[in-house]
Image: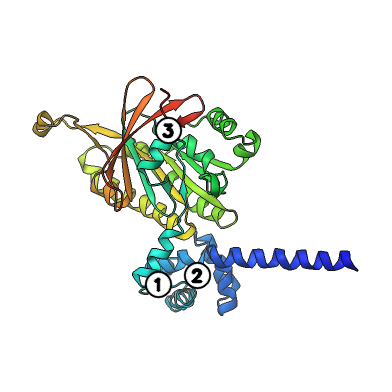
Amino acid sequence: MTAAMQQQAQEVNAFQQVEEEEQYGPLLVRVLEQHGIAANDCKKLQEAGFYTVESVVYAPRKKLTDIKGLSDQKADKIQMEAMKLVPTGFTTATEMHLKRSQIIQITTGSKELDKLLNGGFETGSITELFGEFRTGKSQLCHTIAVTCQLPIDNGGAEGKCLYIDTEGTFRPERLLAVAERYGLQGSDVLDNVAYARAYNSDHQMTLLTQAAAMMSESRYAVVVVDSATACYRTDYTGRGELSARQMHLAQFLRGLLKLADEFGVAVVLTNQVVAQVDGASMFNADPKKPIGGNIMAHASTTRLYLRKGRGEQRICKIYDSPCLPEGEAVFAINADGVGDVKD
Protein backbone atom coordinates (compact mmCIF):
# COMPACT_ATOMS: atom_id res chain seq x y z
CA MET A 1 0.00 0.00 0.00
CA THR A 2 2.87 2.33 0.91
CA ALA A 3 4.60 1.67 -2.43
CA ALA A 4 1.36 2.47 -4.29
CA MET A 5 0.98 5.72 -2.34
CA GLN A 6 4.61 6.69 -3.09
CA GLN A 7 4.06 6.01 -6.79
CA GLN A 8 0.90 8.16 -6.74
CA ALA A 9 2.77 11.01 -5.01
CA GLN A 10 5.58 10.80 -7.63
CA GLU A 11 3.01 10.99 -10.44
CA VAL A 12 1.37 14.05 -8.85
CA ASN A 13 4.79 15.75 -8.48
CA ALA A 14 5.67 14.97 -12.10
CA PHE A 15 2.30 16.38 -13.26
CA GLN A 16 2.82 19.55 -11.18
CA GLN A 17 6.34 19.94 -12.64
CA VAL A 18 4.99 19.69 -16.21
CA GLU A 19 2.23 22.19 -15.35
CA GLU A 20 4.80 24.62 -13.89
CA GLU A 21 6.99 24.31 -16.99
CA GLU A 22 3.98 25.03 -19.21
CA GLN A 23 3.07 27.99 -17.01
CA TYR A 24 6.51 29.61 -17.22
CA GLY A 25 7.60 28.46 -20.67
CA PRO A 26 6.06 29.43 -24.00
CA LEU A 27 2.49 28.16 -24.61
CA LEU A 28 2.27 25.63 -27.39
CA VAL A 29 -0.15 26.49 -30.19
CA ARG A 30 -2.31 23.41 -29.48
CA VAL A 31 -3.46 25.15 -26.26
CA LEU A 32 -5.75 27.21 -28.54
CA GLU A 33 -7.84 24.05 -29.09
CA GLN A 34 -9.14 24.49 -25.52
CA HIS A 35 -10.30 28.01 -26.45
CA GLY A 36 -12.57 27.24 -29.38
CA ILE A 37 -10.00 27.00 -32.20
CA ALA A 38 -10.34 23.90 -34.41
CA ALA A 39 -7.54 21.30 -34.25
CA ASN A 40 -7.24 21.50 -38.03
CA ASP A 41 -6.57 25.26 -37.84
CA CYS A 42 -3.90 24.70 -35.17
CA LYS A 43 -2.25 22.17 -37.48
CA LYS A 44 -2.26 24.75 -40.30
CA LEU A 45 -0.58 27.26 -37.98
CA GLN A 46 2.16 24.72 -37.14
CA GLU A 47 2.73 23.93 -40.80
CA ALA A 48 3.20 27.68 -41.43
CA GLY A 49 5.85 27.88 -38.67
CA PHE A 50 3.68 29.09 -35.75
CA TYR A 51 4.48 26.64 -32.94
CA THR A 52 3.63 28.80 -29.92
CA VAL A 53 0.76 31.08 -28.91
CA GLU A 54 3.34 33.88 -28.52
CA SER A 55 4.38 33.57 -32.18
CA VAL A 56 0.71 34.01 -33.21
CA VAL A 57 0.39 37.13 -31.03
CA TYR A 58 3.65 38.69 -32.24
CA ALA A 59 2.87 38.08 -35.94
CA PRO A 60 1.21 40.81 -38.01
CA ARG A 61 -2.35 39.92 -39.11
CA LYS A 62 -1.19 39.79 -42.76
CA LYS A 63 1.08 36.79 -41.97
CA LEU A 64 -1.89 34.82 -40.61
CA THR A 65 -4.22 35.65 -43.50
CA ASP A 66 -1.48 34.50 -45.92
CA ILE A 67 -1.78 30.95 -44.53
CA LYS A 68 -3.64 28.74 -46.97
CA GLY A 69 -7.05 27.73 -45.60
CA LEU A 70 -7.34 30.54 -43.01
CA SER A 71 -9.95 33.17 -43.83
CA ASP A 72 -9.77 36.75 -42.50
CA GLN A 73 -12.44 35.96 -39.88
CA LYS A 74 -10.59 32.84 -38.70
CA ALA A 75 -7.27 34.73 -38.49
CA ASP A 76 -8.93 37.47 -36.42
CA LYS A 77 -10.52 34.91 -34.07
CA ILE A 78 -7.22 33.00 -33.63
CA GLN A 79 -5.30 36.18 -32.84
CA MET A 80 -8.00 37.41 -30.45
CA GLU A 81 -8.00 34.13 -28.48
CA ALA A 82 -4.18 34.10 -28.45
CA MET A 83 -4.07 37.65 -27.08
CA LYS A 84 -6.25 36.58 -24.14
CA LEU A 85 -3.54 34.06 -23.15
CA VAL A 86 -0.47 36.27 -23.66
CA PRO A 87 -0.37 39.70 -21.95
CA THR A 88 0.46 42.38 -24.54
CA GLY A 89 -0.76 45.56 -22.85
CA PHE A 90 0.94 48.08 -20.60
CA THR A 91 2.71 47.06 -17.41
CA THR A 92 4.46 49.02 -14.64
CA ALA A 93 8.21 49.65 -14.60
CA THR A 94 8.26 47.81 -11.24
CA GLU A 95 7.01 44.61 -12.87
CA MET A 96 9.46 45.07 -15.71
CA HIS A 97 12.30 45.54 -13.20
CA LEU A 98 11.28 42.30 -11.45
CA LYS A 99 11.27 40.46 -14.79
CA ARG A 100 14.71 41.85 -15.67
CA SER A 101 16.10 40.71 -12.31
CA GLN A 102 15.17 37.11 -13.20
CA ILE A 103 17.10 37.12 -16.49
CA ILE A 104 19.85 34.51 -16.66
CA GLN A 105 23.38 35.50 -17.72
CA ILE A 106 25.48 32.82 -19.44
CA THR A 107 29.20 32.84 -18.69
CA THR A 108 31.67 33.51 -21.52
CA GLY A 109 34.39 31.40 -19.90
CA SER A 110 36.44 34.48 -18.95
CA LYS A 111 35.96 36.22 -15.58
CA GLU A 112 37.17 39.56 -16.99
CA LEU A 113 34.73 39.36 -19.91
CA ASP A 114 31.87 38.34 -17.59
CA LYS A 115 32.63 41.36 -15.40
CA LEU A 116 32.46 43.64 -18.45
CA LEU A 117 29.12 42.12 -19.54
CA ASN A 118 27.67 42.21 -16.02
CA GLY A 119 27.61 38.41 -15.71
CA GLY A 120 27.82 37.15 -19.28
CA PHE A 121 25.64 36.86 -22.37
CA GLU A 122 22.07 37.94 -21.58
CA THR A 123 19.17 35.61 -22.37
CA GLY A 124 16.17 37.01 -24.22
CA SER A 125 18.25 39.42 -26.33
CA ILE A 126 20.64 39.56 -29.30
CA THR A 127 24.39 39.94 -28.71
CA GLU A 128 26.51 40.73 -31.77
CA LEU A 129 30.23 39.96 -31.91
CA PHE A 130 32.12 41.66 -34.71
CA GLY A 131 35.77 42.01 -35.63
CA GLU A 132 38.45 40.92 -38.08
CA PHE A 133 39.39 37.28 -38.66
CA ARG A 134 41.32 35.62 -35.78
CA THR A 135 39.82 37.84 -33.08
CA GLY A 136 38.01 35.03 -31.22
CA LYS A 137 34.43 35.32 -32.53
CA SER A 138 34.01 31.63 -33.37
CA GLN A 139 35.93 30.58 -30.25
CA LEU A 140 33.46 32.52 -28.06
CA CYS A 141 30.59 30.82 -29.92
CA HIS A 142 32.10 27.36 -29.28
CA THR A 143 32.63 28.15 -25.60
CA ILE A 144 29.08 29.41 -24.99
CA ALA A 145 27.69 26.30 -26.75
CA VAL A 146 29.11 24.36 -23.78
CA THR A 147 28.72 26.85 -20.90
CA CYS A 148 24.97 27.22 -21.58
CA GLN A 149 24.60 23.57 -20.49
CA LEU A 150 26.09 24.22 -17.05
CA PRO A 151 23.87 24.57 -13.95
CA ILE A 152 22.54 28.10 -13.32
CA ASP A 153 24.67 28.37 -10.14
CA ASN A 154 27.81 27.83 -12.25
CA GLY A 155 26.99 30.53 -14.80
CA GLY A 156 25.04 28.31 -17.20
CA ALA A 157 21.40 28.14 -18.24
CA GLU A 158 20.70 24.37 -18.09
CA GLY A 159 19.66 24.28 -21.73
CA LYS A 160 20.73 23.05 -25.14
CA CYS A 161 22.45 25.03 -27.89
CA LEU A 162 21.32 25.54 -31.47
CA TYR A 163 24.24 26.34 -33.79
CA ILE A 164 23.81 27.75 -37.33
CA ASP A 165 27.12 27.81 -39.20
CA THR A 166 27.49 29.72 -42.49
CA GLU A 167 31.29 29.71 -42.78
CA GLY A 168 32.08 26.04 -42.14
CA THR A 169 34.12 26.80 -39.00
CA PHE A 170 32.24 24.58 -36.51
CA ARG A 171 34.56 22.04 -34.83
CA PRO A 172 33.07 19.51 -32.34
CA GLU A 173 36.56 18.77 -30.95
CA ARG A 174 36.66 22.33 -29.57
CA LEU A 175 33.41 21.58 -27.68
CA LEU A 176 35.01 18.45 -26.18
CA ALA A 177 38.01 20.49 -24.97
CA VAL A 178 35.72 23.04 -23.26
CA ALA A 179 33.55 20.24 -21.81
CA GLU A 180 36.63 18.62 -20.25
CA ARG A 181 37.56 21.93 -18.60
CA TYR A 182 34.13 22.11 -16.89
CA GLY A 183 34.05 18.41 -15.99
CA LEU A 184 31.14 17.63 -18.31
CA GLN A 185 30.58 14.36 -20.18
CA GLY A 186 31.78 14.96 -23.75
CA SER A 187 29.16 12.77 -25.45
CA ASP A 188 26.30 14.48 -23.55
CA VAL A 189 27.61 17.93 -24.48
CA LEU A 190 27.73 17.03 -28.18
CA ASP A 191 24.21 15.52 -28.03
CA ASN A 192 22.91 18.80 -26.58
CA VAL A 193 24.17 20.88 -29.51
CA ALA A 194 21.92 20.94 -32.58
CA TYR A 195 24.06 21.90 -35.60
CA ALA A 196 23.05 23.05 -39.08
CA ARG A 197 25.15 24.36 -41.96
CA ALA A 198 23.47 27.22 -43.86
CA TYR A 199 24.44 27.36 -47.53
CA ASN A 200 22.65 30.58 -48.57
CA SER A 201 20.57 33.42 -47.12
CA ASP A 202 17.24 31.74 -47.98
CA HIS A 203 18.40 28.53 -46.27
CA GLN A 204 19.22 30.62 -43.16
CA MET A 205 15.58 31.79 -43.01
CA THR A 206 14.27 28.22 -43.41
CA LEU A 207 16.49 27.06 -40.52
CA LEU A 208 14.83 29.61 -38.20
CA THR A 209 11.42 27.97 -38.80
CA GLN A 210 12.96 24.56 -37.99
CA ALA A 211 14.57 26.10 -34.90
CA ALA A 212 11.16 27.29 -33.61
CA ALA A 213 9.79 23.74 -34.03
CA MET A 214 12.71 22.24 -32.08
CA MET A 215 12.49 24.83 -29.31
CA SER A 216 8.80 24.14 -28.77
CA GLU A 217 9.69 20.49 -27.99
CA SER A 218 12.85 20.89 -25.89
CA ARG A 219 14.58 23.46 -23.67
CA TYR A 220 17.19 25.49 -25.54
CA ALA A 221 19.25 28.25 -23.93
CA VAL A 222 21.34 29.65 -26.80
CA VAL A 223 21.07 30.23 -30.55
CA VAL A 224 24.43 30.84 -32.21
CA VAL A 225 24.69 32.18 -35.78
CA ASP A 226 28.28 32.22 -37.05
CA SER A 227 28.22 34.36 -39.09
CA ALA A 228 24.91 36.13 -39.74
CA THR A 229 26.18 38.15 -42.70
CA ALA A 230 28.58 35.84 -44.62
CA CYS A 231 25.90 34.54 -47.03
CA TYR A 232 24.54 38.03 -47.69
CA ARG A 233 27.93 39.26 -48.87
CA THR A 234 27.95 36.70 -51.69
CA ASP A 235 24.23 36.27 -52.45
CA TYR A 236 23.70 39.99 -53.07
CA THR A 237 26.29 41.95 -55.05
CA GLY A 238 26.54 45.60 -56.04
CA ARG A 239 24.51 48.62 -55.03
CA GLY A 240 21.58 47.56 -57.22
CA GLU A 241 20.80 44.67 -54.83
CA LEU A 242 21.57 46.56 -51.62
CA SER A 243 17.92 47.35 -50.83
CA ALA A 244 16.85 43.69 -51.34
CA ARG A 245 19.79 42.49 -49.20
CA GLN A 246 18.96 44.82 -46.31
CA MET A 247 15.28 43.85 -46.42
CA HIS A 248 16.12 40.13 -46.31
CA LEU A 249 18.66 40.69 -43.52
CA ALA A 250 16.07 42.68 -41.53
CA GLN A 251 13.58 39.79 -41.81
CA PHE A 252 16.23 37.28 -40.69
CA LEU A 253 17.20 39.41 -37.67
CA ARG A 254 13.52 39.93 -36.84
CA GLY A 255 13.12 36.14 -36.86
CA LEU A 256 16.00 35.81 -34.39
CA LEU A 257 14.47 38.48 -32.13
CA LYS A 258 11.15 36.58 -32.18
CA LEU A 259 12.96 33.42 -31.01
CA ALA A 260 14.57 35.43 -28.18
CA ASP A 261 11.17 36.88 -27.17
CA GLU A 262 9.19 33.64 -27.44
CA PHE A 263 11.62 31.16 -25.88
CA GLY A 264 13.85 33.45 -23.79
CA VAL A 265 17.02 32.18 -25.48
CA ALA A 266 20.26 34.13 -25.74
CA VAL A 267 20.96 34.89 -29.40
CA VAL A 268 24.68 35.26 -30.16
CA LEU A 269 25.58 36.21 -33.71
CA THR A 270 28.89 37.08 -35.30
CA ASN A 271 29.41 39.74 -37.92
CA GLN A 272 32.21 40.55 -40.34
CA VAL A 273 33.89 43.93 -40.82
CA VAL A 274 34.67 46.14 -43.80
CA ALA A 275 37.54 48.61 -44.14
CA GLN A 276 36.53 52.25 -44.69
CA VAL A 277 38.40 53.65 -47.66
CA ASP A 278 36.83 57.10 -47.82
CA GLY A 279 38.44 60.38 -46.69
CA ALA A 280 37.19 59.99 -43.10
CA SER A 281 39.35 56.88 -42.61
CA MET A 282 42.50 59.07 -42.70
CA PHE A 283 41.51 60.61 -39.34
CA ASN A 284 40.30 57.33 -37.80
CA ALA A 285 42.85 55.19 -35.97
CA ASP A 286 40.79 52.05 -36.60
CA PRO A 287 39.04 52.36 -39.98
CA LYS A 288 37.06 49.08 -39.73
CA LYS A 289 33.29 49.03 -39.26
CA PRO A 290 30.74 46.20 -38.99
CA ILE A 291 28.78 45.33 -42.14
CA GLY A 292 24.98 45.24 -42.28
CA GLY A 293 24.54 48.98 -41.82
CA ASN A 294 21.82 50.49 -39.63
CA ILE A 295 19.58 47.40 -39.99
CA MET A 296 22.17 45.32 -38.11
CA ALA A 297 22.91 48.10 -35.61
CA HIS A 298 19.25 48.52 -34.58
CA ALA A 299 18.51 44.78 -34.38
CA SER A 300 21.36 43.93 -31.97
CA THR A 301 20.78 44.66 -28.29
CA THR A 302 24.46 44.56 -27.34
CA ARG A 303 27.32 44.98 -29.83
CA LEU A 304 30.82 43.82 -28.90
CA TYR A 305 33.90 44.76 -30.91
CA LEU A 306 36.74 42.21 -30.77
CA ARG A 307 40.30 42.94 -31.79
CA LYS A 308 43.67 41.23 -31.55
CA GLY A 309 46.04 41.79 -28.66
CA ARG A 310 49.51 40.42 -27.96
CA GLY A 311 49.95 36.69 -28.60
CA GLU A 312 46.82 34.79 -27.52
CA GLN A 313 45.29 37.91 -25.98
CA ARG A 314 42.11 39.43 -27.42
CA ILE A 315 40.41 42.70 -26.47
CA CYS A 316 36.63 43.07 -26.25
CA LYS A 317 35.08 46.54 -26.29
CA ILE A 318 31.42 47.38 -25.66
CA TYR A 319 30.47 49.17 -28.89
CA ASP A 320 26.77 49.65 -28.10
CA SER A 321 24.50 48.59 -25.23
CA PRO A 322 21.29 49.92 -23.65
CA CYS A 323 22.55 49.37 -20.09
CA LEU A 324 26.28 48.55 -20.03
CA PRO A 325 28.83 51.39 -19.81
CA GLU A 326 31.58 51.65 -22.42
CA GLY A 327 34.61 49.63 -21.40
CA GLU A 328 37.17 47.05 -22.44
CA ALA A 329 38.24 43.64 -21.18
CA VAL A 330 41.20 41.44 -22.11
CA PHE A 331 40.63 37.70 -22.52
CA ALA A 332 42.61 34.82 -24.00
CA ILE A 333 41.97 31.93 -26.37
CA ASN A 334 43.32 28.85 -24.62
CA ALA A 335 43.40 25.17 -25.57
CA ASP A 336 40.24 24.66 -23.45
CA GLY A 337 38.27 27.57 -24.93
CA VAL A 338 37.93 31.23 -23.99
CA GLY A 339 39.44 32.12 -20.61
CA ASP A 340 41.44 34.70 -18.71
CA VAL A 341 44.97 35.82 -19.53
CA LYS A 342 47.57 33.76 -17.67
CA ASP A 343 50.29 35.84 -16.01
Asked if the residues shown at circle 1 and circle 3 are in contact, with their CB atoms under 8 angstroms apart, the answer is no
Q: How far apart are marks 1 and 2 (CA)?
A: 27 Å
Tags 2 and 3 touching, CB below 8 Å: no
Label 1 belongs to which residue? 88
Q: Which numbered disc, 1 or 3, marks the residue that appears first in the sequence?
A: 1
Residue furthest to the front? 343
- Is label 1 in contact with label 2 (beta carbons under 8 Å)? no
Quadrant of residue 40 within the rendered picture? bottom right
Q: What residue type is labelled 3?
A: Ser
Q: Is residue 85 visible?
A: yes
Q: Name the residue under label 3.
A: 138
SS at badge 1: loop
CA distance separating discs 2 and 3: 43 Å
Give the image location of residue 45, x and y in percent.
52, 65
Q: In which quarter of the image is residue 150?
A: top right
Q: Disc 3 on helix, strand or loop?
A: helix
- Label 2 residue SS: loop
Which residue is pictured at 60% across the width and 63% down the height? 21
Q: Which amino acid does label 1 sit on?
A: Thr
Quadrant position of the C terminus in the picture: top left
Q: Which residue occupies the foreground of this view, 262 or 81?
A: 262
Distance between mark 1 and mark 3 Cα atoms: 36 Å
Image quadrant holding the N terminus, namely: bottom right
Q: Earlier in the sequence, mark 1 or mark 2?
A: 2
Residue 167, numbered circle? none
Residue linked to disc 2: 69
Q: What residue is drawn where x is 43% and y is 63%?
A: 99
Query: Which of labels 1 and 2 is toward the front?
Result: 1
Between circles 2 and 3, the one closer to the viewer is 3
